[in-house]
Structure formats: structure tokens, C-alpha cells
Amino acid sequence: MSNSRRPFLIPTPQTITNAQGFSAYSIPGHFTEDQFLINTDYVISAKHRLTERYFYAKAPQSIPFSQCFFNTNCTPGSGQDAQFQNHVASLKLASLLSNSLVNEVLVNYTQEPRRPQQREQITDQSLGITPGDPSFPKMPTIAVNGLFSIGGNFNDDSDSHREPVSIFRPACLTRGRHTVRGGFAFERAQFDFNDPGPRRGILDILSFPDFLLGLSAAQNGSQFSNIFLSEGIAGSLSKAYRANNYASFVQDDFKIELALDP
């Protein structure tokens, strides 16, 4: 597949030795990360203080050679563009309820979206392939053992979203030689993901002649198909996990003073 602006999806070998083609490519990958942090402290009164923290990071990546299958190297054009983000926020209220009792309420929020995308958007129809799943008609990942693979990563175009929220309420009470600390924590864990990539399938082919033929056993007149393995996943690939986590603790620090004679 080629036109005036794009090279062949399977490039012509740079060298041929013993009827085996070989090519070496050096294509730079790109990674950047932008971050910012917001800190706020507000004294509500002599006994109450509010603290806010917010951190954000955006880290796009351009990967010229995405993950391959069956120990084969990807050809140029089977790369991946990925978008990673992080939101981390916390809000804490610290209160001095008495000269011996301090109470805190801490709320944390995290959001981590992940979106890897296949760079080349080649469809089954453009290659004359009947889609395994018409709702996701991208070409399958094709690996020719020991030579190359095309079609990008099996899990391209996934979209995952992790979003936990937690509440932590510690307190500290001082009585004489005792300092008692206790607290309760609650977390609502959320993890959503949609992974349509596996629906397009994988084709594993043992040799380049088999790749060129691509026939079934009935078509090539033998007992074996030219395609060694075909694999695909059906059913729902969108999940939404939810879980509630609880924790508590109590700690008593007791101070002992010893007077030693010199």
C-alpha cells in the first residue's frame, strides 16, 4: 500500500542475503510532559485551617514502533500515539477542637485517563478483508514469524479511566503521657475501560510465501492453511469496576521518663 506521500506498508528490503531481506530503521520517538501545581492555604480562624493541593500532568507520546507480537519487529508506519494525563487533588481541614484534641478531614481525588491510538488507520475494506467485527473494521495485526509485523498493537484505541476518591479522618488526643491517634478511611475505587482493539484479531503466518498466498487448506490443495493462527475476541470489551475500601487504626504513644543518677 503506497501513494505519493506514504511509503509501502511493507517496505522493500534494504539488503538481501541468502534470499532473506533485511532493513534497519531509525525513527525518533517523542515524549513531552507538562505539569503544574497549585497550593493554597487558608486560615479560617485561630482554630481552623484549610489546605488545598492540586497537581496536573499531561504526557503525550509518539512511539514509532509499537509493541509487536510473536517476537517480530514492526514495520515503519505501525506506530502508536498515546495520551496520558494525571489529575491529583486533595483538600484538608485541620481543626484544633481543644488544647489537647486535634481533628482532621482529608479528601483525595485522582483521575488517570489513558488513550493509546494506532497511528495508521487502515481498514479491512481497503485490504479486501471481511471484518471480524463490523463495528470495529480496522485491519488485524499480522505477524510473519521472524520477519515483521504490521497493523500496530493488539490493544490500540483503548480508553481507560481510573478515578478513585478517598476520605481520611484522623484525630489526635493528648492526655498526660498518652498521645492517642486514631482514624478512619474510606475509598471509592472506580476503573472504567474500553478496549475494542482485540476485536480486529491477530493473524500469525510462518513464512513470507505463506503471507503472499494467504490461502486456506482447501484453497491451496494441501492439509494446511497458509495462515498458522487466527485469533480474535468477541463479546463486551467495555468494563466498569467499582469497589469500596475501608480502613481504621488506633495508636497510643506512652512516654516514660527515667531519671538516672550520674
Image (tube, rainbow, N blue to C red):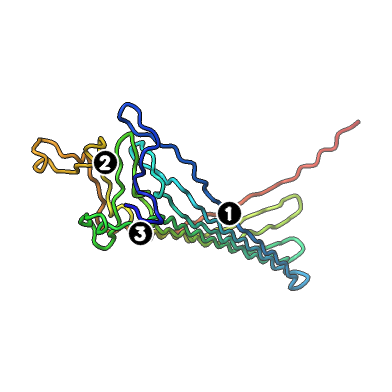
Q: Nearer the viewer, residue 109 or 26?
A: 26
Determine the residue positioned at 43% across, 58% down.
160
Q: Amino acid at mark 3?
A: Lys
Mark earlier in primary sequence (2, 3): 2
Measure the C-alpha gap from mark 1 to mark 3: 30 Å
User: Residue 168: horizontal and vertical position, in percent?
Assistant: 58, 60
Q: Which mark is residue 204?
A: 2
- Residue at numbered disc 1: 32
Q: Nearer the viewer, residue 177 or 154?
A: 154
Q: Amino acid at mark 2?
A: Asp
Mark earlier in primary sequence (1, 2): 1
On screen, residue 112 versus residue 40, left or right, reads left
Q: Residue furthest front?
A: 4
Q: Amino acid at mark 1?
A: Thr
Measure the C-alpha gap from mark 2 to mark 3: 28 Å
Q: Which quarter of the image is occupied by the C terminus?
A: top right
